[in-house]
Amino acid sequence: MKIGELAAHYELELEPLYDSNEAKALFSVAAEQVLALSSAKLIMQKDIDISFINMQKLLSILNDLQIGKPIQHILEEAHFYGAVFKVNEQVLIPRPETEELVDWIISDNSSRFLVNTNYKISILDIGTGSGCIPITLKKHLLKAEVSTLDVSANAIAVAKENAERINVKIKFIEADILTFKSEEKFDVIVSNPPYIRDLEKSDMHNNVLVYEPHLALFVRDENPLIFYKAIADFARTNLKPNGQLYFEINEYLSKEMIEMLVSKGFIDIKLRKDMQGKDRMVRAGI
C-alpha cells in the first residue's frame, strides 16, 4: 500500500470518531513517528510504497485510535513548548492552552532577568502531571529554582523521567495541596488543577473520559473551585512580597474565580483568553 492510500484508509476508518481534518492530522502524527517523514514530505511522497513492517505498525496505531485511545498515549509522547514529553494514562496530555499559560509566566519573568542579571526566582507548580509546566519553566528560566507538587506518586514518576530526559533539575513534592503546609516562600505559584465539573462530562470526547486520569480532571459540581481556594489560601501565606499567582481556569467560571481571588485579598487580577477566545488564564498579585 502507498502512503496516500493508507492516509485515505485512516480517514475512512476514523470517520465515526473524528472529522476529516482530525483524521488527516492523526495519520500525519503516526506517519511522522513510524516513517520519520514530515507532513510536507508525506504529501510529496504519497505514491511511495510502505514496507510491510511499517504498514503493520501504522495499522496497529489505527486499531488503537479506533477504540478511542489518544494518539499521545499510543506513541507515549506529547509535544509541549518545543519539547517532547513522555505521557501515559497516569498523567494528563499537555494542552496548547497550558503552553499559553507557561508562555505568560516566561514572558513576565524573562524581562526581570534582562534588567537584573543577578535576579533569581523561586517557582512552585501545583499539580505536576507530566511535568510540562515546571520542566518548561526551568528550561527557559535557567536561574529559577523550581519545585512541583502532586498527590499522585505515579504522576511524579513520569515527571521525574521527563526532567531527566530534558535535562533539568527541579524539586518534587508528593503531597495533597488540600492539606499541604510549608514554610518556604515563592516568587511565583502556578497551577492547572482539576476544574471540569461533572456536569460537563457529557461535552467531552470519549478518549478523554476513558483514557485520561479523572483525578487530574474533574471536580464536584457543588464545589468546583475547591482546589483554587486551597491554592489561593496557600499562596496568601507562601508568596513573597510582590509575588504572582497564575492559574489555568474553567472558561465557564472566570467570574467566580475573580470574585474568589478578590475576596481573599489578591490585587492586580488579570484575566486572559486563550487562542480560541475562551477565558482560560488568571494572574493575581499580593
Image (cartoon, helix red, strand yellow):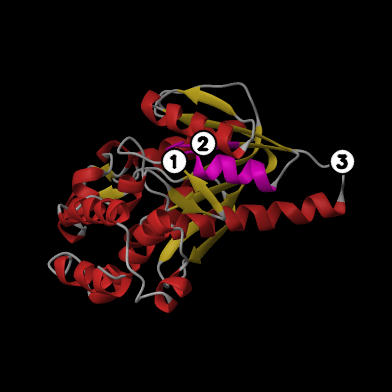
**Is disc 3 placed on a helix, strand or loop?**
loop
In the image, residue 175 lies in the stretch drawn in magenta: no
**Is disc 1 placed on a helix, strand or loop?**
loop
| As drawn, 155 above or below 175 | below
Give how far across and how far down residue 8 sits, in percent.
Answer: 23, 74
Q: Is residue 41 left or right of residue 67?
A: right
56 vs 133, nearest the viewer: 56
Give how far across and how far down residue 243 sits, in percent.
Answer: 66, 43
47 vs 219, nearest the viewer: 47
Q: Which residue is mark 2?
A: 162
Inter-mark Cα distance, 3 to 2: 28 Å
Inter-mark Cα distance, 3 to 1: 33 Å
Front disc: 3 or 1: 1
Residue type, numbered disc 3:
Asn
Residue extent of the magenta highlight: 124-140
Give how far across and how far down residue 237 sits, in percent.
Answer: 58, 31
- Which of the two labelled residues, at mark 3 and mark 1, occupies the earlier sequence position? 1
Contact between labelled residues 1 and 2, with CB atoms less than 8 Å apart: yes
239 vs 248, nearest the viewer: 248
